[in-house]
Image (cartoon, coloured by chain):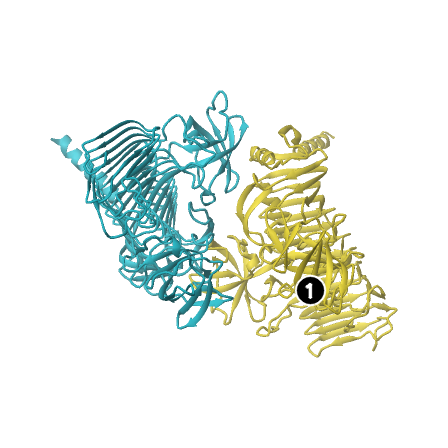
Chain colours: A yellow, B cyan
């Protein structure tokens, strides 16, 4: 009995000490709504260095953050444009800090990054929204069009001042101007990219703008086909400066939790995480604000070289100009073998420059740049950065004979598990989900409706350099609705390494063990799965219903397989399609079981 | 006797231990001529971390340095363009390292900074030259001109590839192109800027270029007056990118020695030193290489916020596109008094952003931004950088009542002494010497012949923000030849704070105690000294001889004084001038002694 009481007491003490948080009302530090509070937040954070388990509680209100007095440092952010960056909440070297907005709005002005978590653990961000006074993309709403003259008139849908000079329009931002750069036509009725958007791509070079006054601009020769009246042409701004300002950046950190945080805008991604262990998103939301059609300029969430568990639950990700979630590693190029077990390597993609590819103790795999397949695994014994692009890596062992051909390295330690549950990803340019990690992946009970593929399992060592082959993926009980309305080539599940002509499929399959089960697909074209270089692919119990929301479009094969083995297609049902639903199995695809399906032509 | 022997032995041991240097023949580390050795040098330097007193000895040869594998970091350099910079010799955190080139040539390719000394002590650089495969400025040699058509034809005097597009010419560099930017016309016969260069300023906007082939370009509407045949128009490139690559940068270091080092080119200054203690230049040389007219794109040497002694001896500085030497501090703006003895400050000049203005323990002076005069001195108790531009500084004491009006801070601890002896500074755009420091200044036995002033003692808190008033300057036994041939407004000695209309001279004089003695001036216009706001100015025993090398030009007053006190003009002799040599003394100049001079009109 005594033993038990002691045990209970002990547990209480442990639990109390674990929860012994200090709560600070930020108002006590001059942090109040409706004035620039960047300096006050910076001073408060500075005073908390080396303190543990602190909650910064913001009384509900609208708080303003300006760049002038913000902390700044040169900052590399994967998949963004590296630069000297201003930061409103530089959460560097923190342990157990919580930012609790209590439902507040955090409003940013200009190029200031809201939140950067670096070399910290147990950071929680909750109960606030992030927005900008002037959103990063300008939106042009087509009010008239003239097919004969290839011209249209648009009004400025967002609150941007602008000027027209020498036939080009420039949109005024906080302290810079953006011409028209990358762009996507959206349909304000669906808040999603319009059906078959390609003919409406804005031709920056040819387009001639004329200011008609009163926020109206006439454009001539801007598009191949004049956009329908009502179309909103969303201007992402020019490449090179349109990914300078992510909303939340997690780097080299552990146990981060993001809960009930809404992001309305960002000059980059909503969330980008690199080399982080355990990230839990619950009620993380990306959406557009009233009066705007789109939300973030890039992905809603993106994870590179993480480990532990990435958990995404109860999230709504919509109206982005890029993917919903992307979880992957990086292939880096071996420049040369220096000798002494040391390699000179080069980070392959310019938007990965500055990445911490590895550290001492990590396992890395030498891979072939021709087949994208692994060759030899070893451990890092030394790692030294030379510059943003190049590093020297020393390993414990090298192959007795160095493999011929071009080589790359992949970090095999930093591969997380992924659980996605009860999320909605929709009405965005690009894909719902991209995933290429070796950890366990479980994607269930989600709703996906994106412009390109639903779930894309790709991996490539030639374009984005996103490693690597998956080993264990379960995708079940999800709804895929109207996937691929961008150009009707999309599939709910598309699995294939992306190879260049000089690359080739190797002896082994690239992806392993993918299960696509019990999903409901509402589809205008009947596409289900396309797969190349997969070993172990179960497609079972899925229901595919015809949807009439969009035209049928290109109508490719419902199921297509190339260089796959051990594939089971069982108990799937296609309903309502008035054209033949077919399986296209190339000779290179072997060991197939196809049974008990309904609605598939023999 | 025994005591004396012990003393001798002790001294020998001390002297041996002081001199116990390890000499490394770099060839043993794969560092050999005629291949890119950046990685090998980097590896060797890395292996020397925490080693003391090492000599890296380069066997005489021509060594090549490329940027691809170079160490890189974001780097603020005063008076330059901050950026992510590649470095060939990142001498960070070193103690007692010597780079001995034994007469070698170090040849750099592209944007790579040769030498950066940071947080190091007792670094010696000697016996090598620095050059670039492609110099930073392109030189256009005028071979034909046509006044009637306002056109001229030029050949490319430097080894730049180029292209002409839409009437503009672009010069190919290592991995970038430069259009025509800032520019200066040089006379290849004197290797100096041409007489009265203003009408030949290249109008970038109006100029229309036409490629005539064979390295010949025709320019129309490029200059107000067509440049004489033979003129070399030197293109510095555009502001913002034409000061990215200084040759030698010393930062936060102590006891640096530069001996017998020659610099033929730089995409910025030859030497820039910030917050360094004791710098000794002996046989430091800036000059142009055969086939080129100019040397560095900016100053030969520049010192900001240093202390201890700056010694410059036996140096030859010529053909630069900016000043010979400039030694000064910085005025930084007080943004606001935060309270609690803390100020929010802003670095005033954008090319000083990133400067370490002060550290704990430094003395700083609060100064008036209206009169540029000191108000209150105190000590720094805390210093925290917010961003490149802004910092928070806490001081031990503040005035009982905060002074009214706009305030600045000046660092009063970091003010060096300066000794310049036996140097030649000539044939450069701009001045020979600028100096505004509170330490002792001795400038003797030098030869100066520059396009603008000879010695400029200025100080300003509105343009370059270069502090501060001098306290003790001796300029003696120098030769000043043809000073000010740029526009004939130059003086051998020009002393005056630079004030804006909204600023005013205060109650105190700005500069104190300047002695200009026994100098020989060979002058085409008879200019000697112009001074404003000086207390204590002795001009004695100088000889001013007429020189006929250039036209007389504007012919201003030989001696001019405003708001000065305690001025002695004695035993100076003007020889050979066939126009009246006069003294212009405003009523605000008091306590004057003028005696025993020859050749001055009464």
Q: Quadrant of the N terminus of chain A?
A: top right
Q: Quadrant of the C terminus of chain A?
A: bottom right
* Position in image of residue A3 (x %, y %): 70, 31
Farthest residue toward the bottom? A587
* Position in image of residue B451 (x %, y %): 32, 49
Q: Seen in the image, is A80 located left or right of residue A12?
A: left
Nearer to us in this view, A122 or B398: B398
User: Dot 1 corresponds to which residue?
Assistant: A220
Chain letter of the residue beneath label 1 in the structure image: A
Q: Residue at x 67, y 41 (%)?
A: A107
Nearer to us in this view, A334 or A206: A206
Farthest residue toward the top? B400
Q: Residue A232 lies in what quarter of the image?
A: bottom right
Q: Seen in the image, is B594 located left or right of residue A392?
A: left
Q: Residue B135 lies in what quarter of the image?
A: bottom left
Nearer to us in this view, A572 or A155: A155
Relative height, residue A198 to residue B198 (above, below): below
Instruction: Give the mark count.
Output: 1
Relative height, residue B44 to residue B19 (above, below): below
Secondary structure beneath dot 1 equals strand
């Amino acid at each position: 009995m005594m033993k038990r009481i002691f045990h209970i007491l002990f547990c209480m003490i442990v639990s109390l000490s674990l929860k012994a948080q200090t709560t600070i009302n930020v108002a006590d530090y001059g942090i109040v709504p409706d004035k620039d509070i960047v300096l006050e937040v910076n001073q408060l954070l500075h005073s908390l260095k080396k303190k543990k388990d602190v909650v910064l509680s913001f009384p509900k209100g609208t708080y303003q953050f300006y760049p002038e007095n913000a902390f700044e440092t040169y900052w590399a952010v994967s998949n963004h444009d590296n630069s000297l960056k201003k930061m409103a909440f530089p959460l560097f070297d923190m342990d157990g800090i919580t930012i609790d907005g209590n439902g507040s709005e955090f409003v940013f002005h200009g190029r200031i990054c809201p939140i950067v978590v670096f070399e910290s653990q147990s950071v929680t961000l909750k109960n606030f929204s992030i927005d900008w006074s002037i959103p990063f993309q300008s939106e042009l709403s087509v009010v008239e069009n003239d097919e004969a003259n290839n011209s249209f008139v648009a009004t400025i849908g967002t609150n941007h001042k602008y000027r027209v000079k020498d036939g080009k329009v420039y949109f005024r931002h906080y302290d810079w101007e953006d011409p028209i750069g990358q762009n996507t036509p959206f349909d304000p009725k669906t808040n999603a990219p319009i059906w078959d958007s390609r003919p409406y791509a804005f031709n920056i070079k040819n387009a001639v703008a004329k200011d008609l006054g009163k926020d109206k601009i006439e454009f001539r020769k801007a598009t191949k086909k004049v956009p329908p009246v009502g179309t909103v042409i969303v201007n992402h701004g020019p490449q090179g400066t349109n990914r300078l300002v992510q909303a939340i950046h997690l780097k080299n950190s552990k146990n981060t939790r993001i809960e009930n945080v809404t992001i309305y805008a960002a000059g980059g991604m909503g969330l980008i995480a690199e080399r982080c262990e355990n990230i839990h998103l619950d009620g993380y939301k990306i959406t557009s604000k009233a009066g705007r059609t789109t939300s973030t300029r890039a992905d809603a969430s993106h994870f590179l070289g993480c480990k532990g568990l990435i958990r995404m639950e109860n999230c709504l990700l919509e109206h982005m100009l890029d993917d919903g979630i992307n979880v992957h590693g990086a292939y880096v190029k071996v420049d040369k073998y220096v000798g002494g077990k040391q390699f000179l390597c080069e980070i392959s993609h310019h938007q990965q420059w500055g990445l911490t590819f590895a550290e001492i103790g990590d396992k890395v795999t030498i891979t072939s740049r021709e087949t994208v397949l692994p060759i030899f695994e070893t451990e890092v014994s030394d790692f030294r950065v030379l510059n943003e692009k190049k590093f020297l890596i020393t390993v414990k062992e090298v192959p007795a004979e160095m493999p011929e051909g071009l080589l790359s390295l992949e970090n095999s330690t930093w591969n997380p598990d992924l659980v996605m549950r009860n999320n909605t990803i929709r009405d965005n340019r690009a894909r719902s989900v991209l995933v290429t990690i070796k950890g366990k992946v479980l994607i269930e009970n989600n709703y996906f409706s994106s412009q390109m593929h639903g779930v894309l399992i790709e991996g490539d060592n030639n374009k984005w350099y996103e490693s690597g082959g998956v080993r264990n993926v379960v995708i079940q009980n999800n709804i895929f609705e109207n996937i691929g309305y961008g150009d009707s080539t999309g599939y709910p599940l598309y699995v294939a390494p992306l190879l260049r002509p000089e690359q080739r499929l190797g002896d082994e399959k690239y992806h392993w063990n993918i299960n696509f089960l019990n999903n409901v697909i509402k589809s205008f074209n009947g596409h289900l799965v396309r797969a190349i270089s997969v070993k172990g692919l179960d497609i079972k119990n899925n229901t595919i219903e015809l949807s009439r929301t969009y035209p049928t479009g290109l109508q490719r094969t419902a199921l297509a397989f190339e260089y796959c083995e051990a594939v089971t297609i069982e108990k799937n049902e296609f309903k309502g399609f008035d054209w033949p639903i077919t399986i296209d199995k190339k000779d290179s695809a072997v060991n197939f079981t196809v049974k008990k399906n309904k609605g598939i032509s023999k």
